[in-house]
Amino acid sequence: MKDQKTLYTLLVYSENVAGILNQITAVFTRRQVNIESLNVSASSIPGVHKYTITAWSDEDQIVKITKQIEKKIDVVKANYYTDDQLFIREVGMYKLSTRLVLEHPEVSRVVRKHNARFIEVNPTYCTVMLSSVTEEIQNLYYALDEFGCVLQYTRSGRIALTRSTVEQVSDFLEKQEALHRK
């Protein structure tokens, strides 16, 4: 029986070098695992970048992917997590027809109900932003789409922090420094 697919989030830390993103994504391609979202940014450690990658997989496959990524020369550390191990957020942005928003006052109520906010209003369009989890961002899209007022919609890739008090990469780097001092 095939393992059930779970949405995993990989947190990968690497040196800031050209081409590393391609090497990381190639691991997923070779194993025929589709990346659901990808976010790359500087980390809290100078010179180290953080890749937040989500993918549906089974645990056996995600363990293999994580190990292969960690073998890359410029990768400092890679770990995988389930949603309950992380603080997770995404941003959704919705461009709405101002005319239709004004014709349907319920649209503003829907925006407020979802804890979203208007960030720009002009005669042509309104821009709404929501910071939340994927499901809530999609639910707001579906609710707004019922009014036929959505001109554009996008959501960011996931950003995540571990629920641990320290990042595992920090512990890893401290141990590496201790080994080099000996």
Image (spheres, helix red, strand yellow):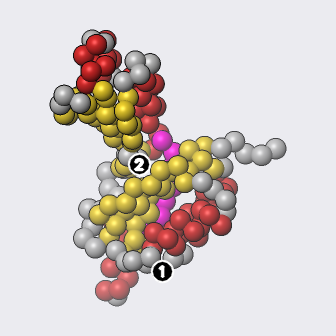
Within the image, what quadrant is residue 121 found in? Answer: top left
Q: Residue at x 38, y 82 (%)?
A: 179
Decide if residue 113 is in sight here: no
Secondary structure found at label 2: loop
Secondary structure found at label 1: loop
Look at label 1 and name its amino acid. Answer: Ile
Residue 157's label in the rendered image is 2
Q: Residue at x 47, y 39 (%)?
A: 84
| 19 is higher (above) or lower (below) than 92 | below
Residue at the extreme right: 1
| 60 is higher (above) or lower (below) than 84 | below
Question: Would you say the magenta stretch is mainly helix, strand or loop?
Answer: strand
Label 2–label 1 contact, CB within 8 A? no
The residue that disc 1 covers is 73
Q: Residue at x 82, y 44 (%)?
A: 1
Q: Tell me which label, 2 or 1, sits earlier in the chain.
A: 1
Depth check, mark 2 against mark 1: the one in front is: 2
| In the foreground, 79 or 182 | 79
Decide if residue 48 is in sight here: yes
Q: Is residue 30 left or right of residue 148?
A: right
The percent coordinates of residue 3 (x first, y second) are 73, 45
Q: Residue at x 31, y 86 (%)?
A: 181
The percent coordinates of residue 119 (x first, y second) are 20, 34
Check disc 1: other Cα within 10 Å, few if <14, some if 14-19, many if 20+. Answer: few
Say if the magenta span includes residue 40. Answer: no
Check disc 2: other Cα within 10 Å, few if <14, some if 14-19, many if 20+. Answer: some
Q: Which residues are magenta?
A: 77-83
Q: Is residue 63 left or right of residue 75?
A: right
Q: Which corner quadrant holds the C terminus? A: bottom left
The CA span between labels 2 and 1 is: 25 Å
The percent coordinates of residue 152 (x first, y second) are 37, 36
| In the foreground, 5 or 163 | 5
